[in-house]
Image (cartoon, grey):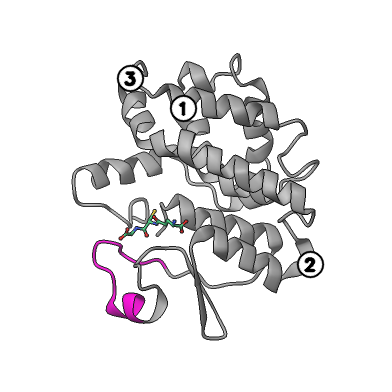
Amino acid sequence: MRFCPYAQRTRLFLAAKGIEHETINIHLKQKPKWFLLEKNPVGKVPVLEKDGEMVFESLVCNEYLDHAYPEHCLTPRDPVEKMRQTMLLSVFDQMVMSHYYSYLRASQTGDYSALSKKFGFGLQHLEKALTEPFFGGNQPGALDYNLWPWFERFSTIPNRSEELSERRVPRLAAWMERMLEQPAVKACYMPYELYSQFVTSFAAGDPDYDAGLG
Ligand SMILES: N[C@@H](CCC(=O)N[C@@H](CS)C(=O)NCC(=O)O)C(=O)O
């Protein structure tokens, strides 16, 4: 699904690691039977298929890619660093990503006053943890790519909230600019106008999975 942030996580890994692959997008409101029967019983994307083996759940897919294609490993080998990244992702999931759709709705009116306080706290936690150019050090690593799909949307939303301003999160704001320059990010980039077109059709109950394809 071209607009899925979880699938984008895995596309980012594939691009960053330079792994040749074929992409098959499916209509999530009219899932093909073969998808549920043979690929993922839960019916969600992304799914990776290699030599008849299926891998689903974006984070599992990405860890699998690092094991199966160890050349440019994005996941930290150091157990302490790996654990730190897993915990930061969990903070992001619970405090930022979980409020993403309320954020999107608020961005349409510019009134973020009802947005959960957790959103800002979660961002501040990530801001403090970002002590180098990227979460992965001098180059983007697993955490950078796993966070990016939501930040790509934040970075292009026309009305950004104060919580995401350069004043409140200067390191994250600079990181977003650096991420936008990464070849893998450019290769998987979805312009906000297109994404917004899809979200509008989704909210109206008839998601246009082919938006922008003409
Ligand atoms: N935890 C899953 C979430 C994946 C997910 O929610 N994908 C959505 C599209 S963005 C999906 O496939 N939805 C179809 C459905 O729920 O039926 C992951 O990380 O891969």
Q: Are marks 3 and 1 in contact (CB under 8 Å)?
A: no
Percent coordinates x, y for residue 128 in the rendering? 68, 26
Residue 152 appears anywhere in the view: no
If you read the primary sequence from the N terminus, does the residue marked by circle 3 or circle 1 appear first?
3
Q: The disc labelled 2 sits on which kind of residue?
A: Glu
Q: Farthest residue to the bottom: give it.
A: 52
- Asked if the residue under mark 2 is in contact with the one under mark 3, i.e. CB atoms within 8 Å, the reply is no
Tell me what residue is drawn at x 54 percent, y 54 percent.
Answer: 9
Q: Which numbered disc flags the more N-terminal residue, 3 or 2?
A: 2
User: Which residue is identified by label 2?
Assistant: 71
Q: Quadrant of ligand 1?
A: bottom left
Question: To which residue does mark 3 refer?
Answer: 114
Cα distance in 3D space between marks 3 and 2:
46 Å
Local packing at callout 2 (Cα closer than 10 Å; few below 14, some 14-19, many 20+) is: few
Which region is colored magenta?
A: 25-37
Give the amino acid type for the residue marked by disc 3 in the picture.
Answer: Ala
**Residue 42 lies within the magenta run:** no
Q: Which mark is residue 119?
A: 1
- Give me the residue at 36% from left, 32% from top: 104
Residue drawn 31% across and 30% down?
A: 105
Q: Secondary structure at mark 3?
A: loop
Dot 1 crowding, Cα within 10 Å, few <14, some 14–19, many 20+: many
Observer-side mark, 2 or 1, equals 1
Front-most of residues 27 and 70: 70
